[in-house]
Image (cartoon, helix red, strand yellow):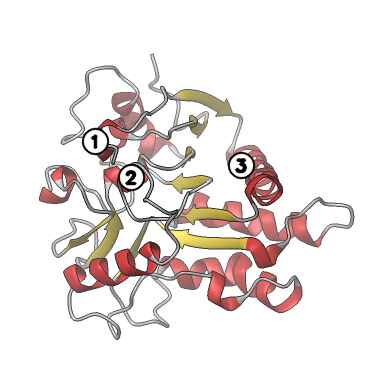
Amino acid sequence: MTDPAKAPVTAPRTEIYAGKDELVSVVAERLLAVLVDAVADHGSAHAVLTGGSAGIAVLEKVAELVAEPGTETPSWSAVHFWWGDERLLPSDDPERNAMQAHAALLDALIAEHGLPAQNVHRMPTSEDAASPTVGAEMYAASMEAFAEEGGHSGLALPRFDVLLLGVGPDGHIASLFPGKDSLGVSGVVTVGEDDSPKPPPQRVSLTFDAIHTADRVWTVVVGQDKAAAAAKALTEGTDPREIPAARVAGTMETIWHLDQAAAAELG
């Protein structure tokens, strides 16, 4: 099998938008188009969602587009949604990325457009898993159930057509934070974090190896508070242990979507 650490990745390209609304609209339209094409090309689509204000705004925009007459949409019965990370909290906690995504888009797709509830693959809750490590193992098992025969880049996980990521002011992505041991975890698809510097402390995250298997990796970065991290991440030679976002990459496409405020410090 292919060594996941040596999976092919693409160089990032940056796209700068006037503001959050324009950025969100473009990403939402692209997301829908990727899902349509993936279902047409290989019979199913797998998308990895992110939380944060920009990530949830993208889902809200997708919901608006789907509700508009004439919008081309995929056969939702063939679409699967996953997450890049999650807080290990009770299932109904509003801080969970899944809760926010359901309110923004997924509930409407399930109720009105035929998305099977079982196609929404939420990360474990604190009710499901006694620790982040257990939660990570549980989510890895759920991904393995949808893995291609022989795995993907040596890992047992679905073929992710698109994977969305936010970027924190400290340069973290998913729940991979600067200086943490999780940055060096390889050969597995998930990792638990017991001591996140951003509350709540207990989380489950995809690993870099898992992220790097995705066909397309897109960041959605909005706001002046992200400008320094974005500039460092996009500077060649930046140490990803200091700025994890420097390792963002997909196998076919890597796009940084930034509004002007987030792009203010790019060279």
**Mark 1 or mark 2, which is nearer the start of the sequence?**
1
Q: Amino acid at mark 3?
A: Val
| Crowding near the residue tagged with mark 3, few <14, some 14–19, many ≥20 C-alpha atoms within 10 Å | many
Q: Is 41 located above or below residue 125 in the figure?
A: above
Task: Write down the quadrant of residue 149 in the picture.
Answer: bottom left
Q: Is 141 located above or below residue 3 in the figure?
A: below
Q: Which mark is residue 168?
A: 2
Q: Amino acid at mark 2?
A: Gly
Q: Amino acid at mark 1?
A: Ala
Residues 240 and 159: in front is: 159
**Mark 2 or mark 3, which is nearer the start of the sequence?**
3
Residue highlighted by disc 3? 27
Residues 64 and 263: in front is: 64
User: Of tags 3 and 2, which is closer to the observer?
Assistant: 3
Quick one: SS at disc 2?
A: loop
Residue 230 position, x and y percent, is: 36, 30
User: Of tags 3 and 1, which is closer to the observer?
Assistant: 1
| Cα–Cα span, label 2 and label 1 | 24 Å
| Crowding near the residue tagged with mark 1, few <14, some 14–19, many ≥20 C-alpha atoms within 10 Å | some
Residue highlighted by disc 1? 5
Image-based side of 241 in relation to 200, left or right: left
Which residue shows up at 38% across the image and 46% down it? 152
Residue 48 position, x and y percent, is: 47, 54
